[in-house]
Structure formats: structure tokens, C-alpha cells
Image (spheres, rainbow, N blue to C red):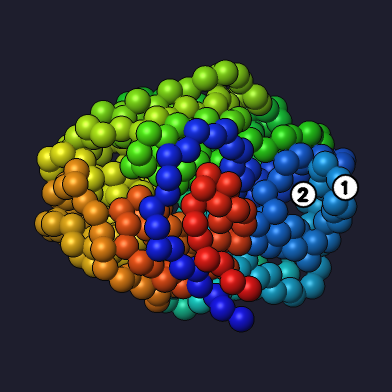
Amino acid sequence: MNNHIEIKHTIKPFHKSIEVSSDKSISIRSVLLASQAIGKSRIYNILESEDVINSLKAIKKLGINFKKFKKFYEIDGFGINGYNTNKKITIDAGNSGTLARLLLGLLVNSKKQIKLTGDESLSKRDFLRVTDPLQKFGVNIETKKNCLPVKITGSEFLRPIKYNEKLGSAQCKSAVMLAALKTPGKTIIEAKKSRDHTELLFKYLKIPIKISKTKKFDLIEIIGPSNFKRFDYKIPGDISSSSFFIVLTLLSRNSKIRIKNVNVNNSRTGIIKILNKMNAKISLKNKKNYRGELLADIVVKSKNNLKGIDCPENLNSSAIDEFLVIFLVAAKARGVSTFRNLSELNKKESPRLEMAIKFLKMIGVKFIRKKDNIKIYGNPEISLRGKYTISNFRKDHRVFMMSCIAALSFGGRWIIENKDSINTSFPNFIKLLKYLGGKINWEN
């Protein structure tokens, strides 16, 4: 069976409305929190990707039952002490860093040792950023080279901590927040700005939390232990999934797209802010508030006069998953684009900054890279005519999808390996590209 796609033609002009896959970050958080609630929670419009399915499998192993209905998943929780950890078990997180790191936070009161594993890609990612603060709660953690597998044994005598999160990692912050949920006393977190989905869910669930915001960091206080009741939640569209169609539209001729019902939480809209600074005209329509999250339709039109940007560093964390496609826009923009302090890109499913460098070099885009900084010299007339093969990218779903957008926007003849990688986050990605008119040879 072939595990690649072929693209030989740029996409023709399109004017369409679409809905993208549901938000992966919120899907995983909702599953984990529902597993700790008291009662039967209902999660609607859940993302049925490999990462989320692995989250459901994980709570099942911990003694939490769930049922799939036509429109929702029902998860039967027994409170913050409801996991069955009376025997040693192994949980496979697959490719999901969000699942692995957040689940460790929920295992701080496990009675027996739990072993957490992952696939080859996840097993190369840093877990010290999570295991270090969690150990301060009083749990026992064993790991080699600060990577998976991780063995965790919880404590009956958890103690609150003060934690300074300096990386701008929502996963690290959330893991500590979930541990604080089970810990007597007040846990204090000083966190660099990052995604705040966990905070908003805590507020919606009326978990005791206090947040004080400054320009550079958020001060979060959580009082535990704190049980909470079952809840209903409808997962909105994912802006990270939307980003590929935003950029495809910008780089295509005479095209327009409306992406419906997307989560446009301010901690996630870095790509819109960056691209609008590059002279895009991306607008938000039909705004509404849902459980503290801001939802909207994203409307994008083609743009011929994109310009380079000196990207403000304070937008990095809110666009960290979108920089690969932002680099494509920089490649076609007039002038030089500068991006700084992108070390977190190399902490993802693959070393994405390194992947981006190889990709830009392959398609002939001029750039200068100094450590974690990169300058990209744009070419508004970029048009590719060669043959390009994308392989050996650790099956990173975002590298695959970025390559598809480049092929449909810039031309050339492309073979892109590991088509199954999109199952991690966006199983219907290729179908949506075809709906917009993309000619993609995808043989089974």
C-alpha cells in the first residue's frame, strides 16, 4: 500500500466555505477533565484523531468508562480520586505530547506505579520540563535521559508548590495545574504567556482559581483538593488546522475562503496577527463567546502585495504551531522577514526549525539562520518547476500539511511521504483540499 501523495499542479481560484477539524488541545483537555468530574459528562464534536483516541484509551485503562453516541462521547467520572491505580499499568500516549504531559499531572496521587510510553517521535521529546515541577509535589518519577518512558508513583501526602514556568509552554503549565487540583493548599504558578484553555475550563467548571495578568506573565493560584461536577462541552474548530487554509488562500490567485466556527482565543491567534502585519486582510466574523472561549468565522482573501515582517517575539507562543506555514508566506512576501528565539519549534513532534531550514533550502528560498533566529528573503515571483520529495520528517503531521500547501501554492512536482501522519490531528485534511479544487493523487 502506498503511503504517499503526489501533487503536480497549483490550485485554481476558489471561493468556498469550510469547517475544519475540532480543536485538538481542547478535545484532549475535555476528555481528561471529564474523567475527573463527578458524573457523566458529554463532549460534543470531539476530534476523532489518533491523539484524542489515545486520550480516551488512557482514561479507559485508568478505570473510566466512556460511550460513543451519534453526536457526543459520554464519559463517566468519579471525581479527582476516581482513577483505578491499584495495580501497575502501562499507558501508551502515542504521538501526543499534550496527553503525556497533562496525564502525568493527573497521576500525582496514583497508588501504584504507572508507566507512560509513546511512539518513536514522542520518546525523543523533553519531559524534564514536566517531571521536574511534578516531583516537587512529592511524587516519585523515574526516567532515563529525561524522555519517555516515564514511571510515576503518586503520593498520599502531596504538598503545594510555587512554580515559575519560563518556557511559555501551556503543556507544562497545565500539568502543574492538574496536579494542583489534587493537592491540599494553594499552588502558585508564575507562567510566561501561553495558551489558556486549561484556565478557561477551570473557570467554567468553577474550580477555585485566581488569575492575575501582567504584560509578561500570568500569576495563577489554585486551591485544592477540589472536586467538580459533570459538564457538557462542544469542541470548536481548530485554528492550527485553519492555518493551512488561511495560507493557501493568501498564496493562491483570486481566491476567498470562510472557515466557520473556529476557536480564536487570543492566546492562539498569533498567526492572524503576524499575517495581518504582513499586509494580509484576515477578518473575524460572527464572533461569540462559548464557555470563555472566543469563536468566530475566519474570512481570508488572496493577497498579491504581501510584505516582510520583523516579527515581534511576544507573538511566538501564540503562533508556535503555525510557524511552518508562516515561513511559506515569508518566502513569497516582498522584502525580508525576521523571526527570533524559535527554540521551542525544535521541541515539537520533529525539530521543526531544522525541518523548515531544510525545506527552504530545497525550494531555493534565500535565508540566514543564526542559532534560533532566521531571516527569510522573500520572492513575490516564486514559481517552482522542479521535482521535490518530502520524507524522513519523523511523520510530523504539520510538516506533511505544510508541504501540501507549498506544492499547491508554488508549483512543481511533489511526492510527499507518510500521508497517514495527518491522522494525528486532521484526518480529513486531504478531503478538504480536494473540495477546494486541489488535484491530489492519493492512492490506497
Q: In the image, what residue type sits under mark 2?
A: Ser
| Residues tagged 2 and 1 counted as in contact (Cβ below 8 A) | no
Residue tagged 1: 69
Name which residue lies at 73% across and 74% down.
Answer: 89
| In the foreground, 106 or 286 | 286
Q: In the image, what residue type sits under mark 1?
A: Phe
Categorize mark 1 by other alpha carbons within 10 Å: few (<14), some (14-19), many (20+).
few
Categorize mark 2 by other alpha carbons within 10 Å: few (<14), some (14-19), many (20+).
many
Count of marks, rendered view: 2
Q: The N terminus appears in which quarter of the rendering?
A: bottom right
Residue 35's tag is 2
Left or right: 84 with respect to 257?
right
Residue 134: x %, y % from top left? 53, 56
| In the foreground, 111 or 17 | 17
Name which residue lies at 65% across and 24% down.
Answer: 290
Name which residue lies at 40% across and 76% down.
Answer: 392
Q: Is residue 341 above or below residue 294?
A: below
Q: Check disc 1 and report its element: helix, strand or loop.
A: loop
